[in-house]
Each structure stands twice: as structure tokens, then as C-alpha cells.
Amino acid sequence: MAKANRVFKQEAPVKKNDVITADVIDLTYQGLGVAKIDGFPLFVTDGLPGEKVEILVTKVLKNYGFARVEKIVEESPDRVALTDQLALTTGIAPLANLAYPAQLAWKKSQIQQLFKKAQLTANVADTIGMDDPTHYRNKAQVPARMIKGKLETGFFRRGSHKLIPTDSFYIQDPAVDEAVRVTRDILQELGLSAYDEESDRGVIRHVMARVGKATGELMVVLVTKTKKLPEADVIVEKLQAQLPNLKSVVQNVNKNQTNVIMGPINTILWGADAIEDVLLGKKYLIGPNSFYQVNPVTTAKLYELAKEKAQLQPTDVVIDAYCGIGTIALTVAEDVADVYGVEVVEEAINDAEENAQINHVNNTHFVTADAPTQMRDWMADGLKPDVVFVDPPRKGLTPDFIEAVGEMGPKRLVYVSCNPATMARDAQALLEQGYAFDGDIQPVDQFPQTTHVEAVAAFVKQ
């Protein structure tokens, strides 16, 4: 009898293709509504908290399931009518159905919950948003596939590798959308093939476009499976004719069967090897592989906040860990004595050094190395920083790095985070190293219409 009870407890109260009326009670970090049927969670595409909806169950797993809204019975006052459902279908903009003020409030709430869960007291300020929270991305990497015999570009349906062709991506700069569209039309006209994952054949894997927001300069990158790009000269000629701001056309070769978009080899087909943008008065050269924030409008706000929280003095020695192409280092250089930047990607350090030169900044010192190792090397050399800036990848800081900071003992550490979950984890470790929060955690909406949020906090040595 006990065995039968266990089996019953594990059986889901719903099955695939059931149509159920349910209340949406929450939103996941992926932007899906949460409904519970007899305690069993269903993650609902296009469901918003506070709504009563009729849903179709699309998938049932052991401990949870998925569903989509078929009919809204009681609508949330925060719902936005969408003219293009692709934003949700593809996951390009999973919060596009939620009014922008509600998006900002939800992002603040996410950070509050994460820090509460970590048992940390933190004053989370209101999320800083954008005047226009659409068409902000300065870069797109758009997959290509053969559909009905011709090359199409678009985005994959959520949770699949089925390409949905589209001309407009809602959150991308119009110049980027136009560049992708024009490139796709030229490739179609010339009869080029798209890469097929299953057969590992075809030519075009992705079309990438980048634009300098301040300069308007445009780069188009064709990511190919093959070393040879058929009709390369004709493609360049047609792109030049149709994109007046075009400064660079690049072929990137990626021969591997992989989810990684870019390969190691770049060939300049025409024009410059980089485009230029301006951020907080500094010029930056951006190549095909350069890491550069995709939303320069809010990046400027983010870096100004970081600079403010650092309370910099003219005599300060500063470390910019995870420095990328040197954006934070160059932003603060004129306010301090010296800046030391470290980054594990050699190409990024080359970019950082070049960016320092073109901005006539002479007090920066960039090193290609693993950040925790380099921190200990600097310490061995007697370097004593006053301020450390960190802007780590989504996985956050390593225990090694946090220990090195504790041993170095800078007066302040300014943490710029793209993942508040790892920031909350790291905050606990920094507190154990003798640091304390300095005032607010400030969320910044770097990625409107998506579930991602940046946050800035300062830690002070006790």
C-alpha cells in the first residue's frame, strides 16, 4: 500500500493537451508565468501574475510542466498588447507583454529576493530604466537556416532549434536590423546555402551586425562553415551599395560542430578591421570578437554609477579585474594615479591597449592573465590598490579571487554584476573577508524586455 501511495504522489495532476483554467501567481527568471495545479507547477508562456487564464498543457515532466495561454479570462493591468508575438515565441523579448514600469519593479524584486534568500540585508534601489526600452542592442548574431529551399535568418523558437524567419527583432537597433535584412536578401539572391547542423554541410552559419551608436559606423560579419565564401566580391559590392554607413565586412570561419557562434579565424573582406564608438567621451575600437556592452545608453549610466560608488581620489591606485577592452579602466583613468587591468582573453587586452593609445591615456597597465592568479602576482610585487572594480561574467567571482581581494585589502571594491544570483553569493564571501555593504544596491536595466538585470554595489573594508 505504501508503494502505491508513493507512485500516486509522483503522478502529475495534469497531462499533455489538457486545457485548464488557472491563476498565474508569479513570474520565473525566464519570464514564464507560474501556475499551480494541486501544488504541481506549470510554467506558462505569456502568463502574467494576477491573471486568470485558460491554458493548454504542452509538456509534463516529473516535477513540473509547461503550458501556453489559450485565453485570458481576467487580464493583468500590466499587460501590454503585442502586435508581434514573435518576441515571446522566440524568447527574444520574454517580458515584452509586461508594461515597462512593471518590468523595472519585477527586476528590483528579483534582487531583493535573492539577497533575502542569501540572508543578507541590502537596500535595493528602484531600477534605473530607459526612456525608450526598445531597439537598443548595438549587436546581433542571427542564425541562418535553409527553409523551403532558400536561406533565411531569424531566431529559434523557445527551447528548440527550429528557426522562425523574421525581419525585425524588437530590441535591436534599426541599423542592425537593416544590415541583417539586407545581407540575407543578398545571400538569397546569390543562392548561397545556410549551414545545416545535422548534415554538417552548408556555408552560412550566422549573420552578425554591429553598429557604433555614437558614430553610426556599421560592421557586417558572415560566419561561415567553409573557408571559401562563394561570391565574396559580389556580396561586398552589394552591401556597400545598400548600406551607406558600412565600414567593415568580415568573414569569420567556424568549422566545428558546436554551439559556439564565432570561430578563431577572421578575414577582412573589405574596409576596416574595426568600427569606432564613443562612450563617456572615450573612443573604442570594436572588432568582430570584441566584448563591448550591447546597450551603450545604460552602460554609460552603469559606469558613472560605478565611478561614483568608488569615491575615487587623484592618488588612488585602481585595479580593473575582468577589464575586457578597457572600458571601465579608461573611464576612471583621468581621476586616479594608475589603473591596472587584467583579462584572460588576449585579443581583449590588445584592444584595451589600442583604446588607451587612441584616447592618449598613459596611466593604464593591461595584462593578459587569469584574474585570481594576477591578483596574487601583483600582491607579490607589492602593488597595494585603493579600489578594485569587478565586472565578472555570469558565473561571478571565484573563491580564489575573493580570497586574493581579502589579502590585498583595498579600501573599496565596486561590483558591477550581470547576474544578481552570483552577486548575492559573492557578497556573502566578501563579508567573510571583512567587507561591508556601502549603501544601496542599484539595479540598472541594461536589457529591457528581457529577464536580465545589471546591478552595482560597493563593499568597504572594515
Image (tube, rainbow, N blue to C red):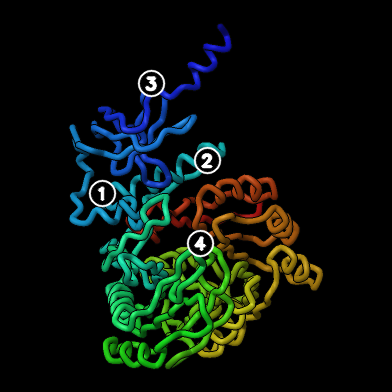
Q: Residue at x 30, y 52 (%)?
A: 88
Dot 3 or dot 1: first in sequence order is 3
- Residue neighbourhood size for the residue with mark 2, other residues' Cα within 10 Å, grouped as few (<14), some (14–19), many (≥20): few
Which residue position is annotated with label 3?
38
Instruction: Confirm whether residue 175 shows in the render.
Output: no
Dot 4: element: helix
Dot 1 or dot 4: first in sequence order is 1
Q: Quadrant of residue 181?
A: bottom left
What is the quadrant of the N terminus in the image?
top right
Dot 3 or dot 4: first in sequence order is 3
Locate residue 299, reporting x and y percent: 42, 68
Q: Is residue 75 above or below residue 171?
A: above
- Residue neighbourhood size for the residue with mark 1, other residues' Cα within 10 Å, grouped as few (<14), some (14–19), many (≥20): many
Which residue position is annotated with label 4?
309
Marks 4/2: CA–CA distance:
18 Å
Amino acid marked by disc 4:
Lys
Marks 1/4: CA–CA distance:
34 Å
